[in-house]
Image: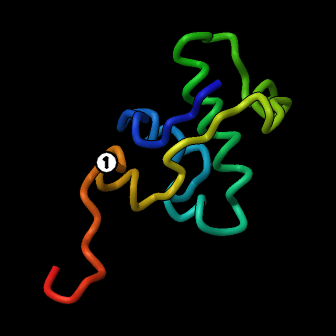
């Protein structure tokens, strides 16, 4: 299963934040990272499979998931394809 952080919709973010009782962006940067991944997998999968539970998400293996664009800065900006600032003086 592919978890593309840049493709998560606002409803999924709100649901995940509500379940976590914290900002997903903050949770992905600290000790709650694992709980954030479980929660995101849960809210994404349950949209296509309403019978999917949080316990089902906890049983997933990391090898079952492909987490892309996990950098919260990329998620906030877009899909990560924006040009990067030049490190050369004047660029």
Residue positioned 46% across, 34% down in the render = 12
Classify 10 Å Cα crowding around label 1: few (below 14), some (14-19), many (20 and above). Answer: few
The image quadrant where one finds the C terminus is bottom left
Q: Residue furthest front?
A: 88
Residue positioned 83% across, 34% down in the render = 61
The image quadrant where one finds the N terminus is top right
- Residue 51 lies, in percent from the top left, at 68, 10
* Image quadrant assignment for residue 37: top right
- Name the residue nearer the viewer: 63 or 22: 63
Residue that mark 1 sits on? 81
Q: Is residue 32 above or below residue 9?
A: below
Q: Is residue 49 above or below residue 9?
A: above
- Residue 67 lies, in percent from the top left, at 61, 40
- Name the residue nearer the viewer: 63 or 91: 91
Q: Is residue 91 above or below residue 62?
A: below
Residue positioned 37% across, 33% down in the render = 9
Relative placement, left or right, of 71 versus 83 is: right
- Name the residue nearer the viewer: 10 or 84: 84
- Name the residue nearer the viewer: 45 or 73: 73
Relative placement, left or right, of 70 versus 61 is: left
Residue positioned 40% across, 51% down in the render = 75
- Residue 33 lies, in percent from the top left, at 68, 57
Secondary structure category for the residue under label 1? loop
* Image quadrant assignment for residue 21: bottom right
- Residue 59 lies, in percent from the top left, at 85, 30
């Amino acid at each position: 299963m592919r978890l593309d952080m840049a493709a998560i919709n606002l409803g999924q973010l709100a649901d995940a934040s509500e379940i976590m009782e914290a900002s997903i962006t903050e949770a992905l940067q600290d000790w709650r990272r694992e709980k954030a991944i479980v929660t995101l997998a849960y809210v994404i999968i349950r949209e296509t499979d309403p019978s999917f539970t949080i316990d089902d998400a906890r049983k997933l293996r990391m090898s079952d998931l492909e987490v892309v664009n996990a950098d919260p800065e990329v998620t906030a900006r877009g899909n990560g394809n924006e040009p990067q600032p030049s490190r050369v003086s004047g660029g």
